[in-house]
Amino acid sequence: MPSALRIKELRDLNDNVLLDSSKGYIPPSFTSAPSNPSNGTTYFNSNDNLLYVYINNWVVVSGEKGTQNNPFTSAIDAMANNAAEGLHWFKNSANQIQELYYANGYVLVSSNDARSSVIPDGASKNNLAYTLRRNGTLGALGTPDPNQDYIIGSFLDNFLYTKAKCLAWGFGSTDETYSYTNQGTNLIVTFDTSSYTQVVPRSSVTVNGSLSSSAAYFVLDGIAADVGLNANANQSTIGIIGVISSDGDPSPGCYLGHGIAETNHEGWYNSSNSNADCQGYTSWVQ
């Protein structure tokens, strides 16, 4: 065998170039994964333009992330890869993939916009079909867009997250004057959570904007937290809620997610305890 310094080119039995002194190691290229691989087997897939290595299963080691063939595994993964705001593919721990909306380290899990009627109005939302997991339905309701009605579905059951954020905007206006990119009076609430119905006290919540002190406890999934599914038309809220009751149930009083005479929108109470509807109401996880 010639020394490494003298090797100009090595080829396999099928005459594929494996090592070129001017290019380095060139893995074999196939259109699908080789059968019966051993740990360490490496190949380039010419169909999806990704490099794979076998370590008990096939793992992508190089290629654009956030695609259907190479999805992100969490919002943190997307953030680490400097993902741009918008739609990207994600994979959960059950190996399910879904296209999600990503922005600033968070993925959108629900949105209720005043201009859209995909999500029903008022107390019609008091149904497990409008929990974030959509009563176990894999696949989204609506469009993953903060300016549209949207609920992520049971993909979220197996998706890693440790933090939640409510972003609402257009306080006092539902005439489409405001949007996700032109928010007017907005509110941002963030807190640590790892489940749909974990109750988080206000002392552990960050509030940016004007919010009533009666919003004393926060939950990621307002419909799931409604034990009797009997919240009134204004208290029935898709996504994150801020309530007065320490058990997280919105029925005794909901102050984040409660507007005035709601139809296809949500709202909140400000620090002066004045409530109003809002144009957009979104929930996100990280």
Image: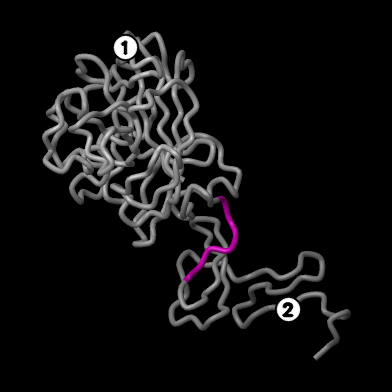
Q: Is residue 257 left or right of residue 48?
A: left
In the image, farthest residue toward the right: 5
* Residue 174, numbered circle: 1
Q: Amino acid at mark 1?
A: Thr
Who's the residue at 28% across and 22% down the image?
266
Which quadrant, please, contains the N terminus?
Answer: bottom right
For label 2, count other residues whose C-alpha is less than 10 Å away and answer few (under 14), some (14-19) or many (20+).
some
Q: Which residues are magenta?
A: 58-64
* Quarter holding residue 104: top right
Residue drawn where x is 21% and y is 48% of the image: 137
Name which of mark 1 and mark 2 comes first in the sequence: 2
Q: Position of residue 236 (x, y in %)?
A: 20, 30
The rendered magenta stretch, by its main secondary structure, is classed as: strand
Q: For the point 42% across and 55% down, which residue is it? A: 160
Residue 61 in percent (x, y) is at 58, 63
Q: Is residue 61 magenta?
A: yes
Q: Is residue 152 left or right of residue 160?
A: left
In percent of width and height, residue 117 lies at 21, 22
Q: Nearer the viewer, mark 1 or mark 2?
A: 1
- In this picture, is 261 found above or below 58? above
In the foreground, 97 or 111: 111
Label 1 neighbourhood size at 10 Å, few (<14), some (14-19), many (20+)? Answer: many
- Which amino acid does the dot numbered 2 rest on? Leu
State the SS at label 2.
strand
Q: Is residue 152 left or right of residue 236?
A: right
Q: Which residue is mark 2?
A: 10
| Above/below status of 250 relative to 174 | below
For the residue pair 246 and 30, the one nearer the viewer reads as 246
State the residue in front, 63 or 177.
Answer: 177
